[in-house]
Image (cartoon, rainbow, N blue to C red):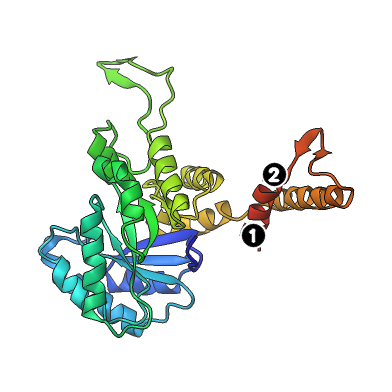
Amino acid sequence: MVSLRPTRAYLAVPAHRSRLVAKAAASTADAVFMDLEDAVPPSEKGLALEEAVQSLASLDWGNKRVTVRINAVDSPFIAQEIRALATLPRLDAVIVPKAERASDIAGIAEQLRAANPDRPTPVALELLIETALGLVNVDALAACHDSVAALHLGVGDFAASIGARSSDIGVSPDGYRHVGSAQSGYASAPLDLFAYPMMRVLVAARAHGLHAIDGPCGAFRDARLTESSAQKAAAMGFDGKQVIHPDQIELTLRAFMPSEQELAQARRIVDAMEQAEANGQGAVTLDGKMIDYANVRMARRIIELGS
């Protein structure tokens, strides 16, 4: 995996809202992306770019990973955005929305480098996988250029892309539909709309050494749903999750940190295997379960997350 700053809580903020951007810079989020795309109306695109450039130059971002989501590859705004952003030393990465074709991503990467060939560290790319075509091509996208550092799942646009009957971002449909005053349909069939795309993006990221970031939970005032959504992503193995409101930051950070019980059990597994090795064994029984080197690798991952 590429070496990045922590990206557990990845806060999105509209670039043209300077007050919100300043709050994001001062927040406890690990990473922030200033949005030039969906959160900005067309009439404010120019202002958003100006504000993003100014914020990158003037705000104290601490140790955060700082990125900007540009407009889509076919947007009339993207060329100007690339020229303006490529010169900013504090910019860690550009997030490319609706990533679908490897040739488009490689082209953006080369444009960024050409706009500032003397930059010591090239601007990285983080790709938003948020359409059916993007998910089909996710392996090619992950491998298309050495500047690609992370894959994000864009849950809202992905749901729209596949025709899901949901209008809530990051939440599966309820599993039933109303007909008149009665309920009918598929209430007994639980539906997890995002299980497959989450795993597909995660596997592609891991196969190519990239970070994997889950999409946001749109119900930012629902603490229980925010936390459970983050816990799901963390349990699957994602490195972090986008959040769209400061109230979601601490819940998300906590979800991606192993509990004391998890850490204690992971250390017991490592200690048990070390003792087994000292006795010339390659496996050992712990709490009635067989432990081998695969368990140790999983346990060390948990210990690493908690360090």
Q: Is residue 202 left or right of residue 176?
A: right
Task: Determine whether 170 is above or below 301 in the image.
Answer: above
Q: Earlier in the sequence, mark 2 or mark 1?
A: 2
| Tally of marks | 2
Question: Within 10 Å of the Cα at label 2, are there few (<14), some (14-19), or many (20+) other Cα atoms?
Answer: some
Question: Where in the figure is residue 14, as x and y percent of width and height?
Answer: 28, 64
Q: Residue at x 46, y 72 (%)?
A: 64
Q: Residue furthest front?
A: 280
Tell me the element at label 2: helix
Residue in the foreground of this view, choosing between 294 and 222? 294
Tell me the element at label 1: helix
Q: Residue at x 22, y 57 (%)?
A: 103
Task: Determine whether 274 is above or below 193 in the image.
Answer: below
> Callout 1, which amino acid?
Glu
Q: What residue is pinned by disc 2?
A: 295
> Callout 2, which amino acid?
Asn
Query: Which quadrant of the view contains residue 305?
Result: bottom right
Residue 257 visible, this orientation = yes
Q: Residue at x 32, y 62 (%)?
A: 145
Question: Where in the figure is residue 54, as x and y percent of width and height?
Answer: 27, 81
Q: Residue furthest right?
A: 279
Q: What residue is pinned by disc 1?
A: 304
> From mark 2 to mark 1, how far is it between C-alphas?
14 Å
For marks 2 and 1, give the one nearer the viewer: 2
